[in-house]
Image (cartoon, grey):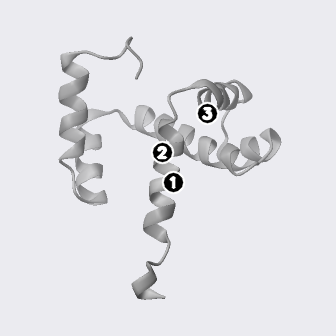
Amino acid sequence: MNPKIKNSGTDALFKAILTLDTVEECYAFFDDLCTVPELKAMAQRYVVAKMLSEGEIYNEIVRETGASTATISRVNRSLNYGSDGYRLTFERLKEQDEPSEDNK
């Protein structure tokens, strides 16, 4: 955990996010919370992180996402030296997408 962002306000925000159950609820909450450019920037960084984790090269990421090479470098630094938050979500989403043994 990054101590630079740890405070009661951030705790309250994260707890609020954890109450959301559906993508539609997330859209409603984040539409109220963020400006359109802020939300688009966060979504772009997440897509960049996913592409980097899948081994895509910078040129392909720029072409597909429109992200600058500076943004891609910052996201790559987070993937390599960050708190592993991206990887945690990638793993959990992959687990959700995989059929369980009962459904095979």
- Who comes first in sequence, dot 3 or dot 2? 3
Crowd class of label 2 (few under 14; some 14 to 19; many from 20; radius 10 Å): few
Whole-percent x and y of residue 62?
74, 41
Label 1 sits on residue: 91
Q: Say whether marks 2 and 1 touch (CB < 8 Å).
A: yes
Label 2 sits on residue: 88
Amino acid type of the residue tagged 1 in the rendering: Glu
Residue 86 in the image: above or below residue 81: below
Whole-percent x and y of residue 38?
42, 31
Whole-percent x and y of residue 43?
49, 43
Amino acid type of the residue tagged 2 in the rendering: Leu
Residue located 66% across and 36% down the image: 67
Amino acid type of the residue tagged 3 in the rendering: Leu
Left or right: 5 as drawn, with respect to 16: right
Instruction: Describe the element under mark 3 as helix, strand or loop.
Output: helix
Q: Which quadrant does the N terminus fall into?
A: top left
Residue located 50% across and 35% down the image: 41
Label 3 sits on residue: 79
Crowd class of label 3 (few under 14; some 14 to 19; many from 20; radius 10 Å): some
Left or right: 48 as drawn, with respect to 10: right
